[in-house]
Image (cartoon, helix red, strand yellow):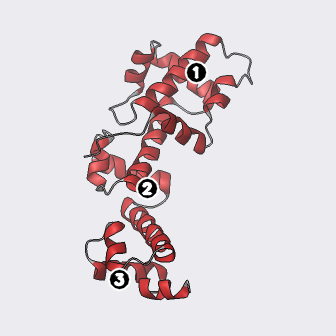
Amino acid sequence: VYLACRSNSEQLNTAEDTGTSLSRWVISMEDGHMTIRSARYLSRTLQYVADHVCDKLSVEIVSREVGVSASHLTALFHRQMNISPGEYIRRMKLQESKQMIRENNMSFTDIAAALHYSTVHHFSRQFKEEMGENFSVYLTLYRLERAQELLNRTDLSIAEIANRVGYANPGYFTRIYKKYRGITPEQARMTRL
């Protein structure tokens, strides 16, 4: 089970990485209706979601914790961010799932549970919708990317590389590598010379 979520600043950096900068949200005054109180609610909401992305979250839970009604929070999000608070929560959870893939060797089911998705199917559907591919393909491509880096930068054996990127069986790793890259890991290593 995933025991530690990233720190608050890392969560907010993830939001900024996805083109949704906190300062842009809070400072945005396009329609002239952003009050200081609204900016505080929005800022507290973003911080709360960042701090609790691995908890069970809903618009109702977040609005209660921030001290504003769910309908007011929804209107504020639509006006200032052009998305609903539920969509923002969903995006942040999916960003966290990508980070969990990168930092841990977790199964799809473990990630869905760690992020408090109601069902694995629900997580699967949202993941594919957001990432454009299913979890297993995304994970395989990520592992092969890491393997390529290790092949290029180290002299580790193929078995050691396979193990480091999450494959216990080096033969299976080689078959997957060839299937997706068209050459074996050994051939890929030879081309770097």
Any part of residue 18 in sight: no
Please say if 86 is above or below 45: below
Please say if 18 is above or below 41: below
Which one is closest to the eye, mark 1 or mark 3?
A: 3
Which residue is drawn at the image coordinates 39% and 53% (left, top)? 103
Q: Residue 38 got which mark?
A: none
Report the front residue among 186 and 47: 186
**Image location of residue 112, percent across then percent down:** 31, 46
Q: What residue type is labelled 2?
A: Lys
Which one is closest to the eye, mark 2 or mark 3?
A: 3
For the C terminus, the quadrant is bottom right
**Which badge, 1 or 2, comes first in the chain's sequence?**
1
Q: Residues within 10 Å of mark 2 (few under 14, many from 20)?
A: some
**Image location of residue 7, percent across then percent down:** 44, 35
Please say if 7 is above or below 152: above
> Do the residues bearing badges 2 and 3 touch, measured as CB atoms within 8 Å?
no
Please say if 1 is above or below 55: below
Q: How far apart are marks 2 and 3 (CA)?
A: 24 Å
Q: Which amino acid does label 1 sit on?
A: Leu
> What residue is pinned by disc 1?
76
**Image location of residue 80, percent across then percent down:** 63, 26
Q: What element carries label 3?
A: helix
**Image location of residue 65, percent across then percent down:** 40, 17
> What residue is pinned by disc 3?
175
Residue 66 image-quadrant placement: top left
Left/right of residue 40 with respect to residue 5 in the rendered view = right
Q: Distance between the residues labelled 1 and 3?
A: 51 Å
Residue 24 image-quadrant placement: top right
Q: Distance between the residues labelled 1 and 2?
A: 28 Å
